[in-house]
Image (cartoon, rainbow, N blue to C red):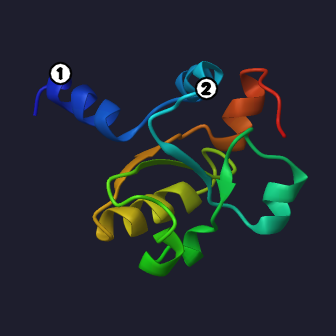
Amino acid sequence: MTALEHFEKLLEFETDCWDVHEDLQSGQPDYILLDVRSPEAYAAGHVPGAINLPHGRIVERSLAAFRAGAAFVVYCSGPHCNGADKAAVRLARLNRKVKKMPGGIAGWKWEGFELE
């Protein structure tokens, strides 16, 4: 695999906090933003507009409210947490389009963006 192939593939499945922030500012992101942490962590502060769906609860039934072709961006606490990876695996197994926001809440705050 070449470096070009590697990084193109990486961008196919990951996005960063800055790009998510820009998408949210536009008012019409083309994905559903999922905070996959616990309800308690979500209540303590989350990315504005994010929906809380803990990674362990991602099953077909919990996705019924979302259209079948919807894409998702998932995040957790930050680079020290693998909750977003677990959520991405669950969504992919359910044939859903998914990207991970690797910085999570830690990256969001590091960029200086506000939590809700």
Give the quarter of the figure containing the C terminus.
top right
Q: Earlier in the sequence, mark 2 or mark 1?
A: 1
Mark 1 packing: few (<14 Cα in 10 Å), some, or many (20+)?
few
Q: Position of residue 34 (x, y in %)?
A: 59, 53
Q: Which mark is residue 27?
A: 2
The residue under label 1 is which amino acid type?
Answer: Leu
Q: Quadrant of residue 21?
A: top right
Give the quarter of the figure containing the N terminus.
top left
Say whether residue 51 is visible.
Answer: yes
Q: From the viewer's perspective, is 8 left or right of 59?
A: left
Q: Residue at x 33, y 70 (%)?
A: 94
Pick out the residue farthest to the left: 1
Count the marks: how many? 2
Viewer-proximal residue among 56 and 85: 56
Q: Quadrant of residue 55?
A: bottom right
Q: Quadrant of residue 51?
A: bottom right
Q: Residue at x 77, y 24 (%)?
A: 113
Q: CA distance from mark 2 to mark 1?
A: 32 Å
Residue corresponding to mark 1: 4
Q: Residue at x 53, y 40 (%)?
A: 101
Say whether residue 82 is visible.
Answer: no
Mark 1: which secondary structure?
helix
Q: Position of residue 19 (x, y in %)?
A: 53, 23
Q: Is residue 53 above or below residue 20?
A: below
The residue under label 2 is which amino acid type?
Answer: Gly
Q: Position of residue 22 (x, y in %)?
A: 58, 19
Q: Is residue 102 above or below residue 42?
A: above
